[in-house]
Image (spheres, helix red, strand yellow):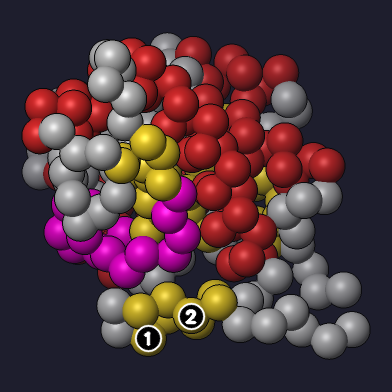
């Protein structure tokens, strides 16, 4: 059995997807080790939750650190200090610059609550309702230099009901986010993801 992949999770808030990933690593569903939970918001509720679960935490506010790359230089230093191999964005409300993306090329994942390439950006559940789509969902993708643009790893579809609100649709999508994000990270930690341009191929399990 290869060594566990050291995973760093970046959050800005309560870290719902963070908790799901940490639970997967604790119960063995994900062959990864939670090396660090980092936040750009020092009082983010998710930091306390991570600490309760015994995971190291770090925080560094981006406020006052201009340009963006100055903050990211510090973030990179922190990630390397904990030997992070895979970076998972879980409600990290910062667009990444080419500096951080390049440092962890093809090793930064994000979860987005829509079926990309439809509805990138913010407030996407309301966008889906306003547009009148019948199916929405969520997407785990590799992060590149553009917003919600990188290669797609896994997706899950969620029907949009006639009486859905932003809140009700968001709640149903969130359940699928927890499932597919854990699935994507588990595949990476098992060495089963191969990125070929915009395509991500899921390979067969490695023979033991």
- Write down the region rendered in magenta: 142-156
Point out the image quarter for the N terminus: bottom right
Residue 2 location (% of width, % of height): 81, 74
Q: Residue furthest front?
A: 162
**Residue beneath label 1, please?**
196
Give yes or no for residue 146 being in the magenta stretch: yes
**Which SS class for mark 2?**
strand
Magenta span: predominant SS is: loop
Counting labels gives 2
Residue at mark 2: 201
Query: Which residue appears at 15% of the width and 59% of the height?
Result: 146
Q: At 14% from the left edge and 33% from the top edge, which residue is drawn? A: 132
Q: Are marks 1 and 2 in contact (CB under 8 Å)?
A: yes
Q: Is residue 112 magenta?
A: no
Q: Pinpoint residue 87: horizontal percent, then vertical percent.
A: 47, 53
Q: Is residue 20 visible?
A: yes
Q: Quadrant of the C terminus?
A: bottom right
- Residue 201 left/right relative to 121: right
The one of 11 and 202 positioned closer to us in this rendering: 202
Quadrant hosting residue 141: bottom left
């Amino acid at each position: 059995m290869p060594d566990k992949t050291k995973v760093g999770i970046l959050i800005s808030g309560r870290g719902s997807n963070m908790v799901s990933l940490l639970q997967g690593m604790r119960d063995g569903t994900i062959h990864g080790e939670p090396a660090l939970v980092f936040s750009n918001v020092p009082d983010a509720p998710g930091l306390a939750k991570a600490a309760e679960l015994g995971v190291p935490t770090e925080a560094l506010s981006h406020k006052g650190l201009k340009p963006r790359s100055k903050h990211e230089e510090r973030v990179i230093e922190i990630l390397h200090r904990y030997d992070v191999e895979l970076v998972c964005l879980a409600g990290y409300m910062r667009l990444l610059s080419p500096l951080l993306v390049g440092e962890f090329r093809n090793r930064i994942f994000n979860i987005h609550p829509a079926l990309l390439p439809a509805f990138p950006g913010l407030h996407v559940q309301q966008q889906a309702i306003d547009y009148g789509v019948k199916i929405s969902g969520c997407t785990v993708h590799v992060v590149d230099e553009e917003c919600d643009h990188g290669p797609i790893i896994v997706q899950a579809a969620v029907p949009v009901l006639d009486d859905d609100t932003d809140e009700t649709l968001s709640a149903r999508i969130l359940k699928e986010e927890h499932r597919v994000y854990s699935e994507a990270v588990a595949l990476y930690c098992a060495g089963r993801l191969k990125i070929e341009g915009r395509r991500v191929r899921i390979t067969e399990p490695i023979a033991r």
